[in-house]
Amino acid sequence: MAENKQYCTFGISGYTFGAAADSVQEIVTNNTITPVPLAPPDISGLLNVRGQIVTAINLRRRLGITNSDSKTGVHILVRGGDSTVSLFADLVEDVMDINSADVEPVPDTVDPSIKAFVDGVYKTNDKLILLLNVNKAVMTE
Amino acid sequence: MPIVMQDIIEFMDDLTKEFLVEAQEHLEHIEGDLVLLEKNPSDPEVIARIFRSVHTIKGASGFLGFKKLQALTHSGESLLSRLRDGKMSVSQGIISTLLELSDTLQKAIKIIEESGKDSALDHTPLVLKMNRILQGTSPEQGKDVKKVETAQNREKEAEAKPQKNEVAEKSAQTEVLSKKEIAPPVQEASKTEQTAAQVNDTTAGQEAQKQENQEGSQSESVLQHISNGSAAESHVRIDVKLLDKLMNLVGELVLVRNQVLQTISRYEDVLLENASQRLDLVTTELQEEVTRTRLQPIRNAWNRVPRIVRDLSLEAGKEVQLILEGQDTELDRAIIEAIRDPMIHIVRNSVDHGIELPHERKAAGKSPAGTLKLKAYHEGGQVTIEVSDDGRGIDIAKIKKKGIEKGFITAEQANRMSDREFYQLLFLPGFSTAEKVTNVSGRGVGMDVVKTNVEKLGGSVDIESFKGKGTIIKLKIPLTLAIIPALLVKSGNEHYAIPQVNLVELVRVEPSNKQNLVHEVKGSWVYRLRGKLLPLVFLSRVFGLSDNFNGDRVLNIVVLHAGSKQFGLVVDQINDTFEIVVKPLSKHLKRIPVYAGATILGDGTVALILDVIGLAQYAHLADSYHKEGINIGMNKTGVDGRENGEVKQLLISSIGNQYFAVDLSAIGRLERFSNNQIEYVGNRQVVQYRGGILDLVSVSSALGYNHNGNSDDLINVVVYEYENRPIGLVVGAIHDIVHQKVSLDKSVARPGCFGRCIVQGKVTELIDPKAIIEVGGINN
């Protein structure tokens, strides 16, 4: 049965992704990241969110989109497994309802490194929203 | 409101859960008491205690419908009542059977925990065994010791004796599955050397009468919670999770307090300052008190030891007297859990390998029973646990042999190692000096795991032994885990925290002294700390950042110890010590060896906490040429790996373009003096050194090198012990320190030289310090 599900959309380097709203805890901006030397390259660092130390994942790196380490962006705090992790993205866009009937499989034109983390796509008039598999995105190797 | 089936089921489940917890506690005490009973068969208190515990479990299991458990405990109870009434005597066989009962009950508890029923329990063989004993047809009743007194006498005795143990309160008629005080979070005022839990129960005398009509009152007993006497009222039972939560919250409070204090300093408001000071005091005290709730007496980690020692000594045919001292010494709960297994392993080693067989002991003039002593005490912010035995001690010769056989060390090294260094070998994985591997002590996998686990807690392990006399193993563990004092340092743009427990000292090297005291030796750096070479680790380099240490900047060195090794961590800036709350890293980062966690600083930024041991390993200090430790990395092949030379640690030096090497294992120190420190006595060169006079001998003169004299202001001197006095060999420029297998070409040996070899592609003479000194004419 097709149902509507809420998604938080956000942008990274021109791509638009959507994360299921029920897995998103909050959005945090303007927070200084403490870098963790010797950490795997897709870990941006550590973040202090109201006393809790959150690991920030550099989503750009993980998805292989670009290797730039831009320090500005937003932290999307998601619940992954049993801990809170932050996905570091460029900007947050919208919250929208997406009907599961309208979700299409990921086209082959999408990079394989991105495809691995995306469950499906949703087309709007002007863009393609890649629906992120949050659990995969926060997984450790 | 009508009672619904659901409520009843939930109620029953809660009762079951509570029953399981209490039964578990009873069982822990039963085990200890049984071992005690074996040693004091005429002590009526002990039997009474055991009886009560088993009886209690029986009652509750009947009520809750655990038929098998009930049958089991019923047989046990019958046996115990015979012992108690003096109709049967305590024997080793009976104790063993009762211990078996205890084990089976433990199993039953687990089965019930998992499946909710006891149906999976196979209790028949044990029940049969016990019934046979009861009927007097069993071989287990054997010779034994003394008769147990009757109920009447016992009651008189119980009143007359000043209690070594807890006071058993005279209470109301019914027997209850009472709410017991829990030993963990809150400590009682009166503590004893024996078991800690107090059971409020009827006295033994009344029990004898009641036994017959127990069945009837069972159903009430579980439901009644009668608290008698003052002891019960002053203690509560708390879920451990709640305590952990409290601890976390206090941790958060500590951080917020740090933040407030830091921010307050910017404002000048008396009222605000006063309030913040008060906040500081209260928070500190709160932290201390809550930390104390997590403390448990170490007897909780030792509660299985008596049984294990008993079983082991029976199995091995040895007699062991166990002494436990300092059982009330308190440790954080987490530490207690973590050291349980290491303690058991060490105890096993002692009984298995340390203590000799009775006839061996007699032959050595010792008492036939060996003594095993566990002692715990607080000292200097740490808890020290000593396990000592008066057994045969550790045979250094055996370690030496094993070490060489297994390739851990070479014969050469072995000749120069101190006893302490030999003991350190025991901590290497794969090392076991057991002649035959017993299935109890394992295959030498134990001590290294013990060491790792203890070091993980920030502690250390040490062994001391005297051949023929005994062995002492000391564990030292810091008291609390979650909130620790740490030194804050800065490297690059970030702060890092170093746990104070690893800190030895702080050194500041002015640019002018850098030359003198800091040596670079082919990419590795060392610092001469009061004559000894301290390997340096540059934090910025570990992190892959750049640094500039050749400039005119002060060098900040934090001297740390990682286990038994020391090294210096070079950082940009050294800040203050703070109390920090250790927060674990997420699984993405947990695996990085150099971090132990993270914390939030007063200004809200996150700082990583360095794991000193991990850092040392990461920076390859195991391979370094630090002289204090044993160079375990010797098995690495060097330049001439294929040839069968001996591996040596060599200092490569040159004078002019002549290279020579000095075997570092023969050398005490490397020093540096400036030319104007050299004084002349007759035609000898000397320098003042450590309050005395150091004679200098020039290697180049002794060996006839052509040499234009030292144009540098500084001379490098290798201090060698010659006939109990130090002599300084003046070497030239120091190039490197290597360790590699050396293939010596002895055909060109000459006085002062052992021969030639090839080191790093250059022909190098290996000098003989002793000969050079003699050639240099010291004896003239």
Image (cartoon, coloured by chain):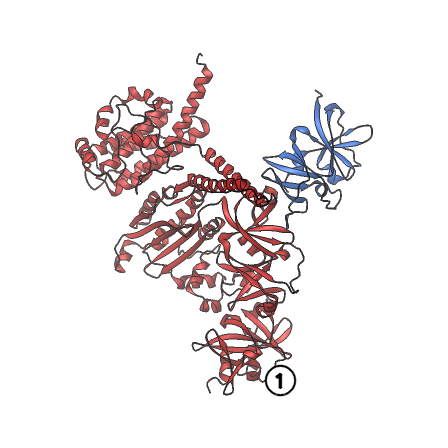
Tell me the residue that label 1 is attached to: B706
Height in image: B674 above or below B406?
below
* Quarter of the image where one finds residue B89: top left
Q: Nearer the viewer, residue A132 or A36?
A: A36
**Residue B412: percent from the left, percent from the top?**
48, 69
* Quarter of the image where one finds residue B22: top left
Which one of the lettered chains is coloured blue? A
Height in image: B229 above or below B256?
above
Crowd class of label 1 (few under 14; some 14 to 19; many from 20; radius 10 Å):
few
Height in image: B693 above or below B287?
below
**Residue B105: percent from the left, percent from the top?**
36, 32
Mark yes or no: residue B706 visible.
Answer: yes
Height in image: B189 above or below A95?
below
**Residue B655: percent from the left, percent from the top?**
61, 79
User: Which residue ends up furthest to the top in the rendered image?
Assistant: B2
Q: Nearer the viewer, residue B777 or B534?
A: B534
Chain at tag 1: B
Q: Colour of chain B?
A: red
Q: Nearer the viewer, residue B399 or B463?
A: B463
**Residue type indicated by callout 1:** Asn
Q: Nearer the viewer, residue B600 or B518?
A: B600
Mark yes or no: residue B122 visible.
Answer: no
Please give the name of the residue rendered at 33% of the width and 51% of the height, measured from the top-left corner: B373
User: Which residue ends up furthest to the right in the rendered image?
Assistant: A126
**Residue B675: percent from the left, percent from the top?**
57, 79
Q: Secondary structure at mark 1?
A: loop
- On screen, residue A10 versus residue B562, left or right, reads right
Please give the name of the residue rendered at 35% of the width and 62% of the height, measured from the top-left corner: B467
